Image (spheres, rainbow, N blue to C red):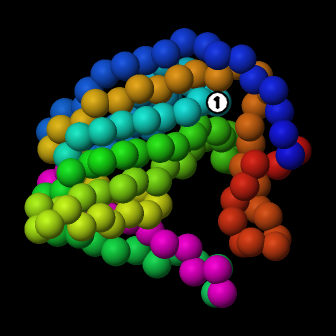
Amino acid sequence: MRREVNRGRIFIGRLERGDDLLAALTDVCVKEGVKIGRVEAIGAVESATVGFYDQDIKVYEYIEIAEPMELLALLGNVSTINNETMLHAHVTLGDDAGGHCRGGHLAPGTVVFACEYIIEELIGEALVRGPEEATGLSLWVD
């Protein structure tokens, strides 16, 4: 599956302390009508929830990190699933104990301390997610 897209609008901003990182970024996309796009962010979180997909049993395992972490990088994309805007993002987080990193699939429950983001809208045929049998994931479909 491959498509050509064009660049659209670019939004740059910051989130408020206490926001849920995933929900707040998704909300920006919904409010601005971004249906296809890419997302980047940096900052810090008060706590985080990240997921790891267990490829053997085809389910996400979630880890709660109940400590402040630097948001070293967030990279994601925007598409739709069941006619709803979906932001799919991965994060790399750094701790204050020697710069150890943790990361994974961004999940609800990650609380913003400070966050600056860039959302780039892409223009083209809709990207829709649907079940993909081989992996058990909801991936872009033709």
**x%, y% of residue 130?**
76, 55
Q: Residues within 10 Å of mark 1 (few under 14, many from 20)?
A: many
SS majority, magenta: strand
**x%, y% of residue 10?**
49, 16
* Residue at the farthest bottom position: 56
The three-letter code of the residue at mark 1 reads Ile
Residue 55 highlighted magenta (yes or no): yes
Please give the name of the residue rendered at 57% of the width and 40% of the height, measured from the top-left corner: 77
- Between residue 56 and residue 26, name the one nearer to us: 56
Please give the name of the residue rendered at 44% of the width and 68% of the height, measured from the top-left corner: 51
Give the total of numbered labels: 1
- Secondary structure of residue under mark 1: loop
* Location of the C terminus (image quadrant): top right
The span picked out in magenta is 45-56
Where, by quadrant of the figure, is residue 56 drawn?
bottom right
Image vertical order of residue 134 relative to residue 108, above or below: below
* Residue at the farthest top position: 9
**x%, y% of residue 61?**
46, 78
Q: Is residue 29 left or right of residue 81?
A: left
Where, by quadrant of the figure, is residue 109 drawn?
bottom left
Residue 142 visible? The answer is yes
Q: Which residue corresponds to mark 1? A: 36
Image vertical order of residue 97 relative to residue 1, above or below: below
Please give the name of the residue rendered at 83% of the width and 33% of the height, measured from the top-left corner: 3
